[in-house]
Image: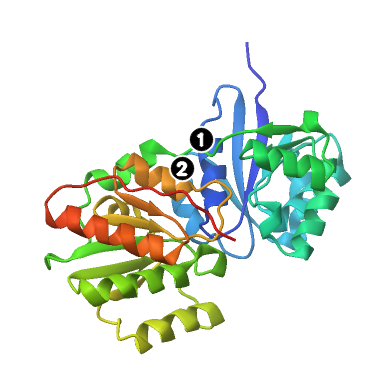
Amino acid sequence: MLTVKTKIIFFLSPDVTGAERVSVTMAKHKDQEKYEVVFAILGNTFGDIISYIPHSCQCHLVPLLRLDDYLKQERPDEVFCSLIHLNGEVLTAAKKIGHIRVVLRNNYNLSDISEDLLNIAKETYPHADMVIAQTEQMKQELIAVCHVSEDKVDVIDNPIDTEYIDEHVRLVSSPYPEDGKIHFCWVGRYEKIKGVDLMLEAFLQVYQNHPNTSLYLIGKVNRESEYYQYLYRYVSNCNLLEAVHFNGFDKNPYPWIKHADSFLIPSRSEANSNVLKEATYLGTPTIYTSDVSEMATKMINIIESANGRKKILCTSIQLCG
């Protein structure tokens, strides 16, 4: 007997952020006997996210202006979107056609987003069939701020794709030079909320007394970004250019994380850090704080542990506004 599968379209942007990677991981966990999974990248290019999508899955490039036509053609049973700036577009297009279940995932703490994005959330989330919150606290925010019915909100912790991680570290050697230094690493986006400036301030304090250290920054560089320009000037003015390495985006950041002496997460705020889970899974000593003096102290602890050929897990979850 032929089983009719439920067709779900997962909408992504071309960029690689935690939201896109979580969406792909959730899609990969769908029962292939029950669901037909399709990926749709909203934009004019497939971008870097295409490398995370399994080759066995359909993947379509959909210009935002053609979204209505695309949904009419594909006729999915369900759509899924995890990007607050695109959630409204996906929901509106699906509701126009009708008979499409809309599942939205909230990828930010509502207290951290701009007024424009908050207004989008307030307008769209109540009309979704289901809204995924990453934590119980986020669920209560959605109910209180966006007036989403409690029975429409489901708390689902962010999954990490351990098979993908294992595959991408198994045959890759350490990307760090054999220079005898202690290697710190950060992976992410150059945005103020990610606290890269706080991390650089802490590293400066450490480097002045421990010059056998280096910091590798793995993330897409936009040289026109004011925040990136500020960070680069800071590194240059503090004579850190030989110690701080702006390595740009890497489709496979996992060897950088795995082989670091310590992984740093200086975010001012995180809804639910994917990269913290990934670093913990890889067994990398991790410092997670946005307090400069505390981060510097913990970095020194890592240096002393590494110099003594002993690794410790040093994780501090202390988010500051």
**Which residue is at the front of the view, 312 or 216?**
312
**Which residue is at the front of the view, 117 or 51?**
117
Residue shown at 50%/55% (left/top)?
49
Residue highlighted by disc 2: 54
Relative to 38, does residue 60 appear above or below in the rendering?
below
Residue 231 location in percent, x, y? 45, 79
**Which residue is at the front of the view, 207 or 262?**
207
Residue shown at 49%/65% (left/top)?
189
273 left or right of 126 in image: left
Relative to 145, does residue 295 appear above or below in the rendering?
below
Residue shown at 65%/33% (left/top)?
155
- Identity, as a three-letter code, of the amino acid under mark 1: Lys
The label nearer to you, 2 versus 1, is 1
Residue 54 location in percent, x, y? 46, 42
Residue 64 location in percent, x, y? 72, 60
**Which residue is at the front of the view, 273 or 93?**
273
286 left or right of 98 in image: left
The image quarter in which residue 180 lies: bottom left
Task: Kindly report the distance in space between the C-alpha atoms of the residues bearing marks 2 and 1.
Answer: 8 Å
Is the residue under label 1 in contact with that under label 2 (CB below 8 Å)? Answer: yes
Residue density around tag 1, few if under 14, some if 14–19, many if 20 or more, within 10 Å: some
Residue highlighted by disc 1: 28
Upstream in sequence: badge 2 or badge 1: 1
* Circle 2: element type: loop
> Quick one: quadrant of the C terminus?
bottom right
* Circle 1: element type: helix
Query: Residue 160 has which mark?
Result: none
